[in-house]
Amino acid sequence: MRLLCLHFWLSVLSLVSFAKPALAQVNWGWEEVVDKSKLPGDALYFGPREARSYACTAYYEGEFYNGKVSRQQCSFAFQGEARNVENFWILRGSRLRWTSFYKADAFPESLVYAAGVTAGKIPVCAVKFRDEYAVGSVRDKLCYIAWGSQEFYFGFYSLAVSDN
């Protein structure tokens, strides 16, 4: 049953994440990573060139979670711990950028969400933590990241947005 559910969501994802609205040009999308040794050149990352953290999303326990690519897996925060999933999607696009955000602010209109838009519209966030860079998911206006084997959250972070 779980495999059937995953197959259903993957089918939805392939239809939803790359659909282009008729009125607005979308310059970004989620792409399934087949060759994990080579990421697309326009993949969204956070941090300087030598310490890039690439944004990914993975389907786990019935939902999509945002995270960063680590050791050819998508590493994300889940219920106080870090999870690593081998099958994931990478966020790519020519007009993506990061903008600073504080939890008391209103979300920008051009916010980028996790691949599964039907899974609750989970924004993509990023932080610099302990001199390294991490990408995660926004829940209740806090940015949750996986770090080592733990989950951490932040009220001041960067959000992925699109310059459509």
Image: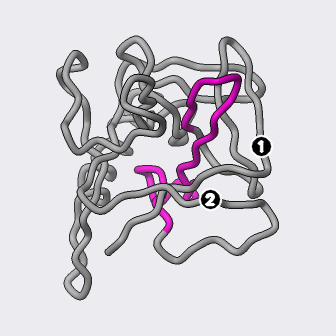
Instruction: Report the residue at 32% width, 75% height from top.
Output: 164
Q: Within the magenta stretch, is there residue 132?
A: yes
Q: Which residue is mark 2?
A: 100
The quadrant holding residue 86 is top left
Q: What x and y, as percent, mark residue 71?
A: 40, 11
Please tell me which residue lies in front, 49 or 79. Answer: 49
Q: Which amino acid is tagged 2?
A: Ser
Which of the two labelled residues, at mark 1 and mark 2, occupies the earlier sequence position? 2
Residue range corresponding to the magenta coloring: 111-135
Label 1 packing within 10 angstroms: few (<14), some (14-19), many (20+): some
Percent from the top left, x then y, of residue 94?
23, 57
Q: Is residue 3 left or right of residue 108?
A: left
Q: Residue furthest bottom?
A: 23
Given residues 34 and 2, the one toward you in this image is: 34
In the displayed structure, does residue 115 sit left or right of residue 126?
left
Which residue in the protein does label 1 denote? 154
Q: Are marks 1 and 2 in contact (CB under 8 Å)?
A: no
